[in-house]
């Protein structure tokens, strides 16, 4: 008698399993994942790993800009009387004749310091907090 009850339970379980396999198209395996667009994946991401990548890429970009500013004002500082035509290319009217004006020099030093402190140093400090 016990073997008949076990057989009936097995049949019920098999019928239930067959029913679920037959109706797999209900989206049970979907879990709501979809292909994200470039904008949502890389710009407006909420994924902590992507945000970390954005943070480090932004830090590297601003570090490069800060170093570039440093090279420009140190070039003028290292050779004060020399003319550097490349300065006129990057600074326009602030470096007429390839010589940097005092305002341009102070602007570059100030922007270099601001960029390095707020956009670069913070990226590395925040990493360890």
Image: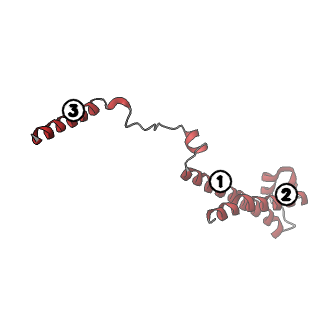
Q: CA distance from mark 1 to mark 3?
A: 57 Å
Q: CA distance from mark 2 to mark 3?
A: 78 Å
Residue 63 percent across, percent down from the top left: 69, 60
Q: Are marks 2 and 3 in contact (CB under 8 Å)?
A: no
Rendered view: 76 above or below 35: below
> To which residue does mark 3 refer?
15
Residue lying farthest to the bottom in this orientation? 78
Return the mark for residue 23: none
Q: Quadrant of residue 20?
A: top left
Q: Disc 1 or disc 2, which is closer to the eye?
A: 1
Left or right for 59, reference 24: right
Residue 99 visible to the viewer = no
Q: Disc 1 or disc 3, which is closer to the eye?
A: 3
Which residue corresponds to the image point at 87% horizontal and 67% vertical from the top-left?
81
Which residue corresponds to the image point at 58% horizontal and 54% vertical from the top-left?
52
**Mark 2 neighbour density, 10 Å: few (under 14) some (14–19) many (20 or more):** some
> To which residue does mark 2 refer?
107
Residue 93 percent across, percent down from the top left: 87, 50
Look at the numbered disc 2 and give the secondary structure of its residue.
helix
First-in-chain label (2 vs 3):
3
Return the mark for residue 58: 1
Rendered view: 2 above or below 128: above
Which residue corresponds to the image point at 85% horizontal and 57% vertical from the top-left?
107
Residue 116 visible to the viewer = yes
Residue 83 percent across, percent down from the top left: 84, 61
């Amino acid at each position: 008698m016990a073997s008949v009850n076990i057989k009936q339970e097995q049949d019920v379980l098999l019928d239930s399993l067959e029913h679920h396999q037959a109706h797999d198209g209900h989206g049970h395996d979907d879990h709501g994942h979809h292909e994200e667009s470039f904008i949502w994946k890389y710009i407006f991401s909420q994924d902590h790993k992507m945000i970390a990548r954005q943070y480090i890429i932004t830090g590297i970009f601003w570090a490069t800009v800060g170093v570039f500013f440093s090279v420009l004002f140190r070039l003028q500082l290292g050779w004060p009387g020399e003319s550097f035509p490349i300065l006129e290319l990057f600074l326009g009217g602030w470096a007429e004749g390839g010589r940097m004006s005092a305002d341009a020099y102070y602007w570059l030093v100030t922007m270099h310091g601001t960029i390095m402190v707020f956009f670069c140093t913070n990226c590395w400090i925040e990493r360890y907090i």
